[in-house]
Image (cartoon, helix red, strand yellow):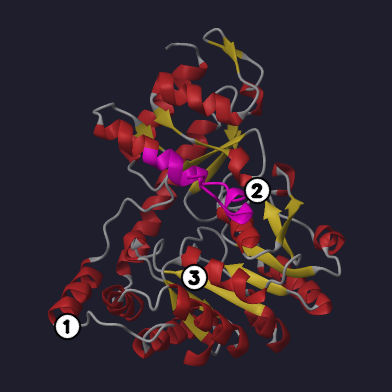
Amino acid sequence: MKTYISRKALSISPSPTLSLDAKFKQMKKQGIPVVGFGAGEPDFDTPDNVKAAGIKAIENGITKYTPASGTVELKEAICAKIKRDSGLDYNISNIVVSNGGKHCLTNVFMAICEPGDEVIIPSPFWVSYPEMVKMADGVPVFLETTEETNFKFSPRDLENCITEKTRALVLNTPSNPTGMVYSGEEIKKIAEIAVKNNIYVIFDEIYEKLVYEGEHINIASFGDEIKDLTIIVNGMAKAYAMTGWRIGFTASNADVAKAMSNIQSHATSNPNSIAQAASVEALNGDQSSVAEMKKEYVARRDYMVERINSIEGISCKKPNGAFYIFMNVRELLGREFYGKTFDSASALCADILDRALVALVPSEGFGIDGYVRLSYATSMETIKTGLDRIEKYIKGEY
C-alpha cells in the first residue's frame, strides 16, 4: 500500500536542536566521551519544594482531568506572578496553561493566523517559530539582523517588513540563540509600531528570569492598546529547571485566550494535573533557587566569553541573558582542517563532533550561517573540557 503524507507535514522540518541532542545522548550511551553544548536545558535539578509539591499532588489524588486551559489555582498564581514581575493586571480569563512553551506557541499561531497571513520573525530565530507558523497556514517573514547590531532590529527595519498581510511579530527577549536583550526604550518603539499597524506581538519571555545586565521589560506594560495586542508566552522550564514537567502559559486578551482554550480542548484535553500543582508551588514558593542558578550562569558565561575570544579564528559577543553563546566561526569556513575544507557551520560542526567529540549546534537552523550556538546550561568542568577540545581542533592537534 502506498503511504500518503500530507503536503503540510512534508513541509515541516524536524527540530535540529532536538535531533542533535538525541545523537549526543546516543553517543554517551555508547560510552563515547562526548561533550555536549547543544540542549537548551538547565543542568540543575528541579527545586526540592517543587518536587515535593508534585509528590504531594500524587498522594492527594490530584491525578484527574483538569479544566482544558488549566486549573484556577495555577492561573491565579500566574496572574500574581505577572503582576509581581511586570506590574500588569490579568485575570484567569486571560490565561491559558499548556503542555510547555512549544504548545503555547502552536496554540497562538493557530488562533490568530488565516491562510497566507504573515508573521514577522527576526533572525537569528529559535528553530521552531517558522515551522509553527507554517503548521498554522501562516507565512514566516524573516527580519534579518547582524552581529554588528547585536542581533537586534531597528524600528525602521521592522516598519519596512510590515505589509497589509502582516498579522504578528514574534519578539523573543532574552533571545534564543543569541542571548541578546532588548532595552526598555527599544521595546517601547516596537510597541508604538505594533499599535500603529494593529499587529499582534507574540512576546516570548521564557528566559525572563535569566537577564544579567539591565532589566527585563514586558512590552504589554506600555499601555492598554499594546497590552491588548500582546500575547505573552512563558513557562516553567528554564527558570525552575522543569523542562520535563511540560508546563507553559500565555496571557492575552480574553478573546484570543478563549480561542486558544477551544483549540487546546480538542488537541490535548488539559495539561498534566501533577505538573500544574507543582507549578503553583514554583511560582508562589521560595525563589532562592532561581537566584542561585542565575549566579552560576553568570560565572559560566563570563568564562566562556573570555575563553572563546582568546582563541584564534572564533569570537563572540557577550550575551545579556538566557544561557547561550552565539559563536562566530566565519573565519574557519573555507580553511583547511585535517585535509578538508568546510563551507558551512553544519559541515564544520559535524567534523568537530566526529573528531573532537564536541556537540555544537550550527546556525543554519536559526536562519543564519557562519555561527555556532553553545549552551552554558552545563557544568563548568564540561565547559572547560569542551573549549579545550575546540581550541585543540582549531590548532590542528587531532
Task: Report x, y in % for residue 313.
Answer: 60, 23
Q: Element at badge 2?
A: loop
In the shown orientation, is residue 27 left or right of residue 177?
A: left
First in residue order: circle 2 vs circle 1: 1
Q: Report the magenta residues as a range.
A: 1-22
Residue at the location (36% across, 64% down)? 291
- The answer to whether 318 is drawn above or below residue 387 in the figure is below
* Magenta-drawn stretch contains 17: yes
Q: Residue tagged by mark 1?
A: 61
Measured in 3D between alpha carbons, the distance from the residue under mark 3 to the one under mark 1, in whole angstroms, is 27 Å
Task: Report x, y in % for residue 351.
Answer: 49, 21
Task: Report x, y in % for residue 88.
Answer: 56, 86
Q: The residue under label 3 is which amino acid type?
A: Asn
Looking at this view, is 352 or 378 the one in front?
352
Q: Residue tagged by mark 2?
A: 124
Badge 3: residue crowd in 10 Å (few <14, some 14–19, many ≥20): many
Residue at the location (42% across, 46% down)? 39
* Magenta-drawn stretch contains 229: no
